[in-house]
Image (cartoon, helix red, strand yellow):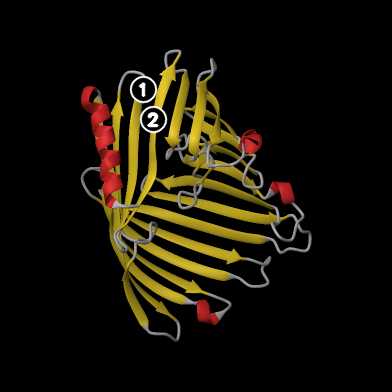
Amino acid sequence: MKKGMIFSLLLCVLVCGAFAQLTFNGEAYVGARVDKIFNKDETVDLFHRKKGNPLFNFTASAVRENYGVKLDVDFVGVANNISVNGIYGWAGFMDDALHFSIGQISDSKYISNLDPDDEVFFDQVKGFRVDYKTPIEGLNAGAAFRAEGQLMEDFFKRIILGASYIHPMGNAVVSYDMGNNHRFLFAANYTGMDDLTDAGIEIYGKNLASWESRGYTGELQFREKIGYRIMRPLTVSMLMGQKFFGISDSDVQLFFRPSASYRIMPGLTGFLTLEANTPNYFDTTDFYITPCLEYTLKGTALIYVEYQLKLSEYKRDSYHRFGFGIDIKAF
């Protein structure tokens, strides 16, 4: 998308915000990595451990009492790539119990982030979404509708339904996408009390309409997580995943990811993550060892230094990596 269009969108937000509360926010992620694949030369490139290419996200919102607009843009540090995640407006009715959004919607209401590196959501769409705060405290329900050129007769066949429940001790979400060959999400997470820091489960299904087809095979993914604080500075956790396929002779994919974090001193935390990953029920298994140091800066930023060793059954895929970078999660 051309830069001129980005500035035009920003101007629209500013004009809408002339008589509204106008807020700006942003995130930035940048890093460098030295990569050594076994039996090959080392490579050096700009690469963030989670976001990949250097990334700056900018958001601008103009908000009135019961309506507003938002612009959400990514600037990616490769060939000056610019992408619009969202440009949309919203309005609230019935004391904001009923929330209506329209445009390219970039925030999700029905999302699971049991694995922070692999969030699952369906309702970031080009179209419109309706959300309702039910009389039950913490329970919300809604639907999203795509408006991306399909025939009117198919419009209601691609609806996305969702509901979430938020409580101080935990949360749950369920969502179903009737488009994209039918997808399903259920997740429940316990947010922690005393030494049990978190515990949760996530179930994600895709290609459900062609469950046993060899072209678009159905998949059912399970993830489970539990974390426990052994002592005040030391916390351990386990994230596990299983993936099953609709075709009975397909291999089961598994991974196990134990990790530990230790608060060395104020602001400085050490992490160690181990992972065993098998795409074929232990016929072959890849192992990852990832130690990391993070230092939290004042505000919402941190710097990290990370090393990763991959030991693969297919030796050509084995590597070791060293990386460092900075996360600025809010300006």
Q: What residue is shown with label 1?
A: 67
Left or right relative to 145: residue 292: left
Task: Kindly give the residue lying farthest to the top in the view shown.
Answer: 94
Where is mark 2, residue-wise? 89
Residue depicted at 54% across the width and 23% down the height:
139
CB within 8 Å, label 2 to label 1: yes
Residue 240: where, in percent of width, then height? 58, 54
Classify residue 306 as left or right of residue 288: left
Residue 158: image x %, image y %?
A: 62, 38
* Kind of element beneath mark 2: strand
Which image quadrant is residue 216 in?
bottom right
Above or below, 228 against 60 in this view is: below
Percent position (x, y) of residue 160?
A: 59, 36
The mark nearer the N terminus, 2 or 1, is 1
Q: Nearer the viewer, residue 274 or 171?
A: 171
Answer whether residue 168 is visible to the viewer in this image.
yes
Q: What percent of the width, then of the height, locates residue 157?
A: 66, 36
Looking at the rendered image, the quarter that the C terminus falls into is top left
Please name the amino acid that badge 1 sits on. Answer: Tyr
State whether residue 237 is above or below residue 135: below
Q: Residues within 10 Å of mark 1 (few under 14, many from 20)?
A: some
From the viewer's perspective, is 124 left or right of 296? right
Q: Separation of disc 2 and disc 1 at Cα?
A: 7 Å
Q: Amino acid at mark 2?
A: Gly
**Residue drawn at point x = 34 percent, y = 26 percent:** 68
- Which class describes the residues within 10 Å of circle 2: few (<14), some (14-19), or many (20+)? many
Residue 120's disc number: none
Left/right placement of residue 232 relative to residue 218 reads left
Residue 197 versus residue 54: which sits nearer the camera? Answer: 54
Secondary structure at numbered mark 1: strand
Quadrant of res 141:
top right
| Point 54% across, 81% down: residue | 315
